[in-house]
Image: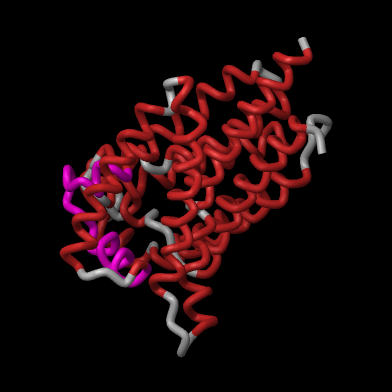
């Protein structure tokens, strides 16, 4: 397979994973739309201005919100299929890929609201959100590889900064972080907390170092490995052998939506090799 096609297919698979993961989440579980739709801070002034009854909305809207979440799940499923089937000749991709990216961005903003508007919570979704837009650009806009590289590097850097801010304790360290370290690596809690700090420092090193030419390739390789480890840790650390199907049902989408955390650095490594090949050919 040609280097360019390999890079594009890597990006296609990343888009498929994140879209399929969000589709499964919406169709089988839930998503945080109620954080906005039931927010008195955001919507109560509008309801009062329009003369609508807020209590009636809160008490009667849940079933419709649930149906809307399922509909969005179908949309993400369509985006997942489109990400591995559309080509530059298909007009559908011109609309589905950016629309999927916008929907991922909106979902990230909802999680951001749920987590007290911590900036780190918002930017850690950057790799997930960037993938559909990068695929759209490569299929329909054909920018120079350098432009794609810069956009991808920014997305990876923001993702690792977001993770790092939580890991080093700038924000309250999520209990799930420590529990995953304990379950996945089998280390005591005190050791897990120390290693989280080390991992957070390395996240910051990655975020800065990937913009330095000589450091880019090794740090992207580290980012890929660590990104995949943290993605699969969601399933492995929480897997229960007594209820295997339920464990997969509950945690697989958490893995899929985080595949870009490791996969986008792989794509950038492939893109770097493509740039070298083009440079040597010219």
Q: Is residue 51 visible?
A: no
Residue 240 image point, x, y percent: 43, 82
Residue 95 image point, x, y percent: 67, 34
Q: Which residue appears farthest toward the top when viewing the image?
A: 282
Task: Tell me if 199 is positioned left or right of 84 in this view.
Answer: left
Task: Tell me if 72 is positioned left or right of 160 in this view.
Answer: right
Residue at 69% across / 44% down in the picture?
83
Q: Is residue 30 visible?
A: yes
Task: Tell me if 196 is positioned left or right of 212 in this view.
Answer: left
Along the line of sight, which residue is nearer the eye, 241 or 39? 241
Q: In the figure, 276 relative to 132: above or below?
A: above
Q: In the figure, 123 relative to 75: above or below?
A: above
Q: In the figure, 135 relative to 15: above or below?
A: above
The stretch of residues the image draws in magenta is 163-184
Along the line of sight, which residue is nearer the eye, 202 or 70? 202
Is 248 one of the magenta-colored residues? Answer: no
Q: Quadrant of the C terminus?
A: top right
* Number of numbered markers: 0
Q: Quadrant of the N terminus?
A: top right
| Colouring used for the render | secondary structure
Q: Which residue appears farthest toward the bottom when viewing the image?
A: 242
Q: Quadrant of residue 11?
A: top right
Residue 223 image point, x, y percent: 45, 42
Residue at 28% across / 60% down in the picture?
177
Q: Assign the magenta stretch its main secondary structure.
A: helix
Q: Quadrant of residue 56?
A: bottom left
Along the line of sight, which residue is nearer the eye, 125 or 219? 219
Residue at 66% across / 42% down in the picture?
10
Residue 70 image point, x, y percent: 55, 62
Residue at 32% across / 33% down in the picture?
205
Q: Quadrant of residue 165?
A: top left
Task: Tell me if 273 is positioned left or right of 131 in this view.
Answer: right
């Amino acid at each position: 397979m040609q280097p360019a096609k390999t890079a594009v297919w890597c990006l296609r698979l990343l888009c498929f994973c994140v879209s399929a993961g969000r589709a499964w989440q919406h169709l089988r579980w839930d998503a945080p739309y109620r954080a906005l739709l039931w927010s008195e801070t955001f919507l109560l002034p509008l309801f009062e201005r329009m003369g609508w009854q807020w209590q009636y909305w809160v008490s009667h809207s849940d079933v419709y919100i649930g149906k809307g979440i399922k509909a969005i799940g179908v949309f993400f499923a369509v985006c997942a299929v489109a990400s591995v089937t559309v080509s530059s000749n298909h007009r559908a991709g011109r609309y589905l890929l950016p629309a999927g990216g916008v929907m991922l961005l909106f979902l990230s903003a909802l999680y951001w609201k749920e987590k007290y508007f911590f900036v780190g919570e918002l930017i850690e979704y950057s790799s997930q959100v960037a993938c559909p837009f990068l695929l759209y650009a490569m299929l329909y806009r054909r920018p120079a590889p350098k432009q794609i590289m810069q956009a991808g590097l920014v997305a990876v850097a923001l993702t690792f900064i977001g993770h790092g801010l939580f890991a080093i304790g700038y924000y309250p360290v999520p209990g799930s972080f420590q529990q995953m370290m304990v379950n996945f690596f089998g280390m005591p809690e005190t050791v897990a907390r120390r290693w989280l700090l080390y991992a957070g420092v390395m996240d910051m090193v990655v975020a800065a170092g990937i913009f330095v030419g000589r450091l880019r390739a090794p740090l992207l390789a580290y980012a890929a490995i660590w990104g995949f480890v943290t993605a699969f840790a969601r399933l492995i650390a929480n897997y229960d052998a007594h209820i295997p199907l339920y464990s997969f049902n509950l945690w697989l989408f958490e893995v899929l939506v985080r595949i870009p955390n490791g996969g986008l650095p792989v794509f950038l490594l492939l893109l770097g090799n493509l740039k070298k090949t083009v440079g040597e050919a010219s």
